[in-house]
């Protein structure tokens, strides 16, 4: 770790010159707000209230003390702060903002078809070791897809596997939801029809982050699974068809659910592709089945439908789609707001097919992974 070679007081910030030549600007209010004594040791919540000092707070004295800490005696509040140098360097927002953002996502296309093994993991590995759990979480976070093999096939037995990550996300479809062919279904998944690649529940403000389809029985003809990396398709459009991409990120689409069993009509507007503060992909909203009658401005309806049509076609293009068949004991796990999933039709008279579905919020996947690899 670098040491500090020089400190310089300026109008609103302390300039730190590091002995490796880097320079940092630390705003005075930022420094005061991040005094190591500001936080409670257990809750780790900030107890110090920046509103109690004026905007003019500044260092009356500042030095690197004999313990090697940056010591600042403040102009008000009769307080002295001691900062760990390594902490300052790690949290330096001058340096952070110069660094190029690197996406955690490993985008994939149809070539993954020849390497399904690379996204497969044995259930025992997850249950018996944190290394196994981390491997699963990394696949989920980086690739957005994993297939757990050899899980038990007893009903509801996936709870135990998923609880290695965290609690599940409840919805009115119940947990688990039963993906089985039923009369008068309230969702097209509960039929024997084919399902085009889609995400689940795009009409929620916050659709489930991850989905887990646990295969219990799959002996009917048909019912093969598909997956497509929506981020990879969006990236292709960003590079090659800029106008389409621009429409996908800028115009909110409308989604809705008003199935006959519900006492609520849920709907939400969101663009097909949304981005993070770094311009990386945040989520995809795509579901032919639950997109509502759009009501965007007449001047943009043509381009919105053209973009939706192009995006939808690519999400079903052989260049991007992988296909596989679930076996009993498989848990098909994926980022519901990135990887769109589908299935072919099946013949309910030829055998039986039963999946149980679960959701987990994205915060739980990312939070658990960051805890385990900290
Ligand atoms: C679902 C779904 C796929 C399948 O239940 O949301 O898309 O293979 N199911 O039945
Ligand atoms: Zn689905």
Image (cartoon, grey):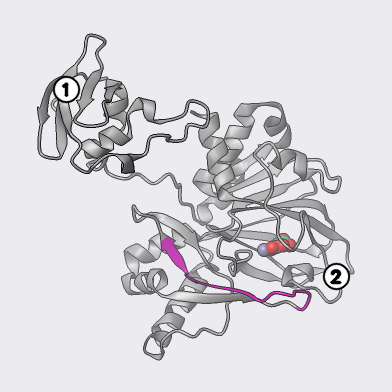
Residue lying at 27% horizontally and 38% vertically, measured from the top left: 30
Residue lying at 15% horizontally and 27% vertically, measured from the top left: 60
Task: Say which quadrant the N terminus sits in.
Answer: top left
Task: Report whether residue 138 is seen.
Answer: no
Res. 267 image quadrant: bottom right
- Circle 1: element type: strand
- Circle 2: element type: loop
Q: Is residue 92 left or right of residue 282?
A: left
Q: Is residue 233 left or right of residue 260?
A: left
Q: Is residue 351 left or right of residue 121?
A: right
Circles 2 and 1 in contact, beta carbons < 8 Å: no
| x, y percent for residue 364 | 59, 44
Query: Few, some or many C-alpha atoms within 10 Å of disc 1 (few <14, some 14-19, many ≥20)?
Result: some
Residue lying at 48% horizontally and 59% vertically, measured from the top left: 283
**Which callout, 2 or 1, points to the residue nearer the camera?**
1
Q: Which residues are magenta?
A: 260-274
Q: Is residue 209 left or right of residue 61?
A: right
Q: Name the one closer to the observer, 34 or 197.
A: 34
Q: Name the one closer to the observer, 185 or 232.
A: 185
Q: Quadrant of ligand 1?
A: bottom right
Q: Which residue is mark 1?
A: 62
Compared with 69, 182 (above or below) is below
Q: Is residue 106 magenta?
A: no
Q: Which residue is mark 2?
A: 182
Compared with 149, 354 (above or below) is below
């Amino acid at each position: 770790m670098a040491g500090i070679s020089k400190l310089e007081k300026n109008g609103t910030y302390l300039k730190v010159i590091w002995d490796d030549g880097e320079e940092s600007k630390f705003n005075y209010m930022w420094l005061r707000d991040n005094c190591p004594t500001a936080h409670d040791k257990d809750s780790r919540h900030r107890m110090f209230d920046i509103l109690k000092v004026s905007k003019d707070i500044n260092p009356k004295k500042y030095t690197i003390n004999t313990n090697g800490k940056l010591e600042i005696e403040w102009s008000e509040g009769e307080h002295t702060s001691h900062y760990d140098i390594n902490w300052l360097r790690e949290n330096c927002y001058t340096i952070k903002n110069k660094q190029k953002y690197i996406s955690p996502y490993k985008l994939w296309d149809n070539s993954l078809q020849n390497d399904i093994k690379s996204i497969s993991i044995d259930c025992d590995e997850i249950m018996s070791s944190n290394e196994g759990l981390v491997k699963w979480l990394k696949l989920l976070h980086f690739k957005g897809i994993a297939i757990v093999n050899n899980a038990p096939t007893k009903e509801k037995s996936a709870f135990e596997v998923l609880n290695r990550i965290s609690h599940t996300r409840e919805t009115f479809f119940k947990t688990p939801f039963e993906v089985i062919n039923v009369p008068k279904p309230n969702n097209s998944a509960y039929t024997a029809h084919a399902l085009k690649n889609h995400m689940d529940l795009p009409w929620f403000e916050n659709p489930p982050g991850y989905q887990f389809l646990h295969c219990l029985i799959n002996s009917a003809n048909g019912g093969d699974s598909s997956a497509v990396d929506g981020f990879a398709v969006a990236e292709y459009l960003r590079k090659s068809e800029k106008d389409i991409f621009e429409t996908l990120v800028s115009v909110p689409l409308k989604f809705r659910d008003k199935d006959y069993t519900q006492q609520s009509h849920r709907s939400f507007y969101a663009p097909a592709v949304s981005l993070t503060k770094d311009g990386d992909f945040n989520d995809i909203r795509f579901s032919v089945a639950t997109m509502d009658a759009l009501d965007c401005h007449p001047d943009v309806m043509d381009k919105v439908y053209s973009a939706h049509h192009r995006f939808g076609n690519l999400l079903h293009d052989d260049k991007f789609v992988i296909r596989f068949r679930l076996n009993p004991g498989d848990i098909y796990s994926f980022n519901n707001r990135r990887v769109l999933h589908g299935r072919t039709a099946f013949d309910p008279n030829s055998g039986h097919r039963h999946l149980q579905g679960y959701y987990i919020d994205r915060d739980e996947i990312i939070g658990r992974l960051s805890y385990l690899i900290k």
